[in-house]
Amino acid sequence: MFINFFFNLKAHGVPVSLHEWITLHHALAQNLNDCSLTRFYHVARSILVKNEIFFDRYDLAFLDTFKDIETTDEMLEKILEGLRKVKELKLSEEEKRQVDELNLDEVLRNFEEQFRQGHFKNHVGGNRAIGTGGRSTQGAWGYNPAGVRIGQGESRHKRAVQIAEKRSFRNYSSSITLDTRQMKVALAHLRALLPLGPEEKLNLEATIDATSKNAGEIELVWENKEKKAAKVILMMDVGGSMTPYARMVERLFSAASSQISRFKHFYFHNCVYQDLWTDIERRDSVSTAEFMKSEDSDYKLIMVGDAEMAPSELTWVNGAVDYWYHNDLPGLVWLQRIREKFRDSIWLTPIQNRAWGYVQTTRMIADIFPMFELTLDGLDDGVKFLMQGKGRLHA
């Protein structure tokens, strides 16, 4: 059953590593789940799930694996009618070690067999039946290092399978365009841009050496590595359909700006020309050329816009959509210059990937900037690209 859980997690897209899977088994060996499926649900999630966006997928995988281990309402009521409360069984540590420990598959088979044979009526003590005060794998007020608790005063509404069925984390879906509900989750994705402390990485040479000295039994050796803080420039398209996104993205990055070593943000409308605005109302501006000349090229640049406009706004002199604004160079030239200056740069758009190919200006901008969706997955991939030069590029 446990191996099925691992494969179900993989099938639902939860990125579980071997290191995390081994850690879970160490936790089970220490009985951190206290022989409770509910505790196991929380312990396993805390170890196996590294990012909140996978909570919903974890619940689905948990349901697929463990839904049959829970009793139905009718079965539970029938069993409880045959159980009577007795004094809790107390065993010494030596006596506990003598109790047979079954795996979950054996526990489930034994439970079904005992129920089918009716071995749940007035059973006190014993090693196999559904009863009270005994050493079997199912019942109440007894002891077994693995099993299913029935009764014992626990609220059934706290059961692990019911918790998973509620699927409280659907709002964390990574495919939904970012909105204010996901602000907290999105901030977690920006940790790669923050001045983090030590984190673990595998020391391959030390692992090989330790494994050789350990008669071939694998021994993983981990070490700490430091991440440098990033400098970030955010440029946001404002006006029209982009206004709600610009305000949201500004709040998102402003919340992280106190921890980013150097953070700057500017505004434009549809495309960047010879001016960048420093306020969302576009009253105060700075020269784009002077800005590019004065700033260091090691900034991480994030452009945010829907990339949808008239082709003339990209390709014509005086093609800017604002009637009174005259641009002396086509917008496409300015975007190319910005990309050449800041090589670590990306473009985030609220428009879904499948629509990009139908809009000429979107295709043109995607040829200049690596483009990502303004979703949790897109933000995650974009940040990975900025920090490591890696990520799923979309064009």
Image: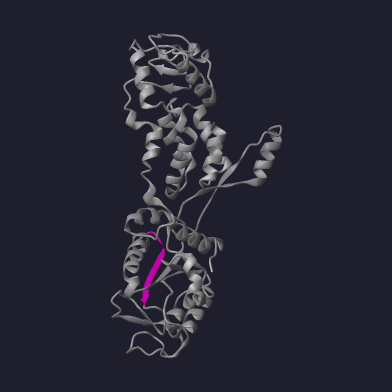
Closer to the camera, 238 or 287? Answer: 238
Q: Residue at x 57, y 34 (%)?
A: 3
Q: Considering the whole magenta stretch, tell me its main secondary structure.
A: strand
Frontmost residue, 127 versus 31: 127
In the picture provided, is 70 more to the left or to the right than 220?
left
Quadrant of the image occupied by residue 322 = bottom left
Q: How many tags in the picture?
A: 0
Q: Is residue 383 above or below residue 282?
A: above
On the image, the x and y values in percent for residue 376 come to 43, 57
**219 versus 113 height, above or below:** below
The way the protein has been coloured in the rendering is one colour
Q: Quadrant of the C terminus?
A: bottom right
**Residue 350, how many percent across, how many down?**
41, 66
In the picture, measured across the screen, residue 77 lies left or right of residue 11, that is: left
Q: Where does the image place residue 152, in percent across and percent down from the top left?
A: 34, 20
Q: Is residue 16 visible?
A: no
Q: Quadrant of residue 255?
A: bottom left
Residue at x 38% of width, y 43% of height:
167
| Residue 353 painted magenta | no
Residue 372, horizontal then vertical, whole percent? 48, 65
Q: Is residue 263 covered in magenta? A: yes
Residue at 48% x, 79% y: name it. Answer: 335
Q: Which quarter of the rendered picture does the N terminus lie within? A: top right
Residue 235, relative to residue 18: is it above or below? below
Judge whether residue 204 can be spotted in this image: yes
Q: Nearer the viewer, residue 363 or 76?
A: 76
Magenta-colored span: 259-268
In this rendering, the answer to whether 231 lies above or below 42 is: below
